[in-house]
Amino acid sequence: MVRFVVNGRHHETEADPETPLLYVLREDLHLNAAKFGCGLGQCGSCTVLVNGEAVFSCLTPVLVLEGKQITTLEGLGTADNPGPIQQAFIEEQAAQCGFCIPGMMMRAQALLQKKPQASEAEIRAHMQPNLCRCGTHMRILRAIHKAARIMQSAAAGAATPQIGGGGS
Amino acid sequence: MRALKIVFGTLAALLILAGAFFAYALHAEIQPREAGPVNFDPQLVSRGAALAAIGNCNNCHTVPGGKAFAGGLPIPTPFGAIHSTNITPDPETGIGRWSEAAFQRSMRKGVDREGRHLYPAFPYDHFTLVTDDDNKALYAYLMTRRPVQNTTPANTLPFPFNIRMAVAGWKLLFFKEGPYRPDASHDGLWNRGAYLGEGLAHCGACHTPRNQLGAEKKSQAYAGALVEGWWAYAINKDSPAPVAWSQDAFYHFLRRGWDDAHGLARGPMSPVVANLGSVPEGEVRALAAYYATVAGEPSAERRQKGETLIAEAKQPAIGRTLPSADAQAVPRGGNPQDFGAKIYGAACANCHEGGQPLPYGGLNLNLSTAMSGPTPHNPINVVLYGLPPAAGDRSPIMPGFHGSLSDAQMADLFRYLRSRFSDKPAWENLEKDISAARSAAGATALYPSPGSQPVPADASQRGVIW
Amino acid sequence: MSRLIISRRSVLAGTGALVVSFASTRLLAQDAGQTQAPAPLEAPPPPKPAKLPGSLDTTRMLDSWVRLDAKGEVTIFTGKAELGQGIKTAVLQVAAEELDVPFVALRLVTADTARTANEGYTAGSQSTPNSATAVRYAAAQVREILIAEAAERANVPAAELRTENGAVIAPDGRRFPYGDLVSETLFHVEAQAEAKLKSPSAYQSIGKAQPRVDIPAKLTGGEAYVQDMRLPGMLHARVVRPPSYGAELEAVDLVATQAMPGVMQIVRDGSFLAVAAEREFQAVKAMRVLAAAAQWREKPGLPNQADLASVLTNLPSRELVILDQRTPMPPNPRTLEATYTKGYHMHGSIGPSCAVALMEGDSLTVWSHTQGVFPDRKAIAEMLRMGEDKIRVIHAEGAGCYGHNGADDAAADAALVARALPGRPVRVQWTREQEHGWEPYGPAMVTRAKASLDEGGKIVDWEYHVWSNTHSTRPGPAGALIAARHLAAPFPEPEPEIIPQPNGGGDRNAIPLYAFPSARVVHHFIPQMPLRVSATRALGAYMNVFTIESFIDELALATGADPVEFRLAYLQDERARDVVMAAADRFGWKKGEKPASGRGYGFGFARYKNFAAYCAVAAEVEVSFETGRARLVRAVSSVDAGDIISPDNLVNQIEGAILQAASWLLYESVAFNDTRITSTDWASYPILRFNAVPDSLEVTLINRPGQPFLGSGETAQGPGAAAIANALANATGKRFRSLPITRERIKGAIGA
């Protein structure tokens, strides 16, 4: 039995402890965003946050997740109430087939949580582990900058809660 | 009277010594040459390119994301950070005004054009061995690079280390001027390897431990040392590699960046092998011949052990074929109480016992030097940060686990790895080392794995956390 | 059920001939075997049907495309599939425009063998010209019928009525919501060749910014892909594919796999091997154990990777002369010639292929991201020896496919496993290695260009040769499916097809748009396929446009002409000239401008298939002389796609195509040894990452309201690659004729 928190809610899983988190998220929790792209840690389609850090959920067995905070894209907002990253990506129409985009958004979220003022060069370097085959990179970068601006103006307005308990 | 004589005598002796010292320490400025491009024989430039690759010049003299040879990379020393210089032929900020004689002197004596001593972070204690002819070729190469205007940052050395004259004292103690003298008891190939290895390739600069004043301890040549957060393993008879390094293994590793029985070059060794991939094959064979003797002949027992390990590793986990399914293995059952074993089985065995051949498959860890090394620095870095891919070249990729494993979990994993894959005593202070490596993120140099294409290292690509 | 429908309205009287809805053609097909009743002697022979716009020509009933119910809910049907190219949104925009219905009120049904028209494959950049056109005309005619209906009820001439917001409005303000006007058979009539289309000046939806309908769900964790499907009782399956083409399964010990937790079924048929389990990770582990237990007999059969060009040109080929307009040459021409080569490249879909299948009784349903639900159904039916009418294939989105990837095969795999587990939905997910190893690649090609110049430097003769395999092995017959070829009673691999001009396969865009006085173009069609190949985005146009545009550049250089001016001298098509000038202008192209050291400028242009969208690209690259590493720094593209439905979506597609082409050009070739494909993952087949993304990428659109829609999903592939290649030549002074133009090749050419 492994207990962890997903998007703020407590979960227990009786799944085989070697099961990669990706399968538990998709199959047991019916969370669609994280995707199977390679299972090898090469493409980032499966990216989620664990205690605020971006990880490849395809290679993270649930047995290491006891007590940890997991954030998936679903935890950042909904279609009716999108979070800053989602709002930015939707406004910029930063998707073609869209398969890689949740992983991109989670990786970006990890960076912006730690470094709200990340520069273009830092963003590009940070996004390296994630692949996009459709060539949506320019829009992804624009959307990340936009998300940073949205987050900053929200922070200026009110204190923004940290997602994923990564610790400030 | 006698006291005065003694005083005067001592003063005179001191003056003579000082005079001798200054005579030794003072160097004249060599007049600048006329600024402007020079024509060199393309063959000479080509030879210089190969020599510069062996010398790994591009790696120290380029910052991540920066222009080749424009300098500015802070090289950490126990005394502070020393920044590499701009060695592009820019007339104002580079070496564009240096004559060949000035360049020769810098390599031979460690003195710049103006006559100032260079800090031995520039390893002229090795480069002094380079012959005039080879320096000529290097000069031709450097002077035909693209000039870059870049004023490098000032060094951050505290007193008295910021006084360059003090370096003369260091040289007196530790510096023996070259060039290389061949050893008649060995053949031409070995001598070429010794010349390159002890000279341009300056392998000892990382692989030999240093004393308090930062000089290599000659008596412990190639006994291993900690450099920039990575452990450069012993490559002498004390090599911890489970399979002893043979001449063939050295050749393959240095030439291709990996070897079946030793795994991949990574960390600061990655750009070294990328550079060596781009030079004439004979030079790498020479290095292999020389270092085979540095490593020495393994004992019969060690040789036997190595052969057994290789044979075992060749047996795939349970008879796999690729790519019928995926690259990952059937994880071994381990001691269910051993948390480290469980992590290994679930997250690592998939690739590391998958049977996919190197360089793209994970190394069978029974063959890993990292598991048997004196310190866990290297595997900690690799497990935390992974091996990032080279841009556009086929190259191995390993993901990092800094997000998914806590310090305690990593320590559990490492205790298991050490006990399963080596017969060495347990590593102590694992949690401390792991935590230190985590906080050093950003300061730990990370390098893309060498691509399988034989082109020089892309020094500007360093530093991407995976 | 078969119905005889005769339109009640004189304006739609048409020919008065027998008109039958598409839904009942199946019945007719079943009747085909029976003796036909002799036609009455006095009935005139049915006149040839009029040519209808787009796909209306093959699916002629209005209600095959547009349906309204009494509540006023509008459903649009398209036989095309959403691939991430935005076709759902574009089709809805067109429908909203012509129906005068709010965009948000529309529902859309896409490619489904039970519900939509058979529009073949969503490929070849034909969705807007064929499907959007059909929907447009159908919607416009539906609107006319609604107006006519309202006219009767309102007792007002139709010409005085207008439509707005889902209702017909009378001059006195009376509103007739569409729902009040419809009846079951109102639109069950054949379409006409003409329709009253909205005038561009009145556009409210076409050409306007319309956010894509599929994006919100994809970006907020909604169920959007076939990979997200969860049907009650669904099982998870994995295939164990052979390690190489032609490998045969000699033996497999099933005992260990059968004993594993959750394993429900192992399917073995010849060399087809798969396992199904309750939970997905159980299936993954079972697959690994099963793979380890399988023993294969392999045989070497792959060509020498280092010498592909010579391998290809030495294979038997059929010579197809696709252009031959020779005129005598002037004396003393100056002749240039160059040969170019390309390796195999991959689709490399980021999400490996996936399908869900359910066998219930004697009926099979398959959910797949195939580009062609009808052809895939036909192939699966043949493979399973079932009637096509017993199989329904429904398109569900996958990751971007960029052509014929593993989708059709995954559907076949799922069908085979589902057949062994009737009553349980079965989900087959391919692994990364399987997608890399088994998808059909973009063929390796050789091209040769030769031109003669007169004394004034004008091109007086042009000769072009292209050697290539087929660029389509789509199902088709069952033998096009991997699984079918691996069965104990295998289906034979079908003979490769030649896609004739003007579409072309390997010879797509082999005929340049430039006006040369004398030209000959030959397509050397190579039937034998050493590696599995099929259609990738733009097919042969990627290589042909790269070649032609590189060679045009070489000619320009040889005559001292500016590359852009040189092209314009041979472009007579006004719209082609416009995109060329627009791209050059926006880029800041200056004749004779010398770039900074390490940088280069290049240009590329083509009209996709010479009848689809126009695209010009100007590019700036930077090259590191130390390492040979090249990067696209900046690109500006200009595109003319006729009447542009979704401007931002088009920009998105062009940006994507240019970056994808950059990745293909600079990095990509499939690696293999004499037996196996060795490019099995992203380490052994690298593609573009963020460190190589340009600083800027700009797309300008030249809108032609009122002009036909021109297919544009593939138009930038060739020009983008060509512009980069030409920029590399400009930066290094060396010409690169072998793709991919890797760092190693650049460094090798530059030297120390």
Image (cartoon, rainbow, N blue to C red):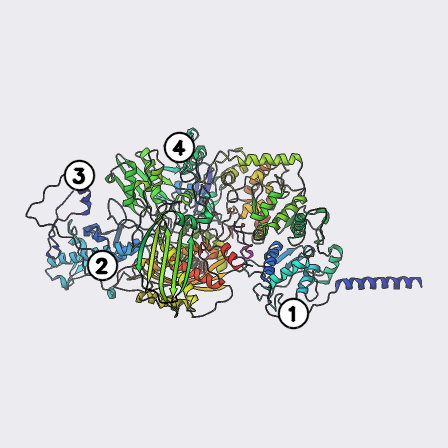
x and y percentages locating residue B125 in the rendered image: 70, 55
Give left or right: position of C483 versus C731.
left
The chain to which mark 1 is attached is B
Tell me the element at label 2.
helix
Could you tell me the amino acid type at mark 4? Val
Q: Earlier in the sequence, mark 2 or mark 4?
A: 2
Is B45 colored magenta in this rendering? no
| Spatial separation of the CA atoms under disc 3 and disc 2 | 41 Å
Q: Which residue is mark 1?
A: B33
Q: Which residue is mark 2?
A: C98
Bin the neighbour count of mark 3 within 10 Å (Cα to Cα): few under 14, some 14-19, many 20 and up.
Answer: few
Could you tell me the amino acid type at mark 3? Gly
Number of the front mark, 3 or 4: 3
x and y percentages locating residue C549 in the rendered image: 39, 61
Number of the front mark, 3 or 2: 3
The disc at residue C313 is none
Q: Would you say the magenta stretch is mainly helix, strand or loop?
A: loop
Label 1 with label 4: CB-CB less than 8 Å = no
Q: Which residue is mark 4?
A: C263
Q: Which residue is mark 3?
A: C33
Number of the front mark, 1 or 4: 1
Bin the neighbour count of mark 2 within 10 Å (Cα to Cα): few under 14, some 14-19, many 20 and up.
Answer: many
Residue C85, image quadrant: bottom left
Tell me the element at label 1.
loop
Could you tell me the amino acid type at mark 2? Glu
Considering only vertical position in the picture, is B251 above or below C327?
Answer: above
Residue B57, image quadrant: bottom right
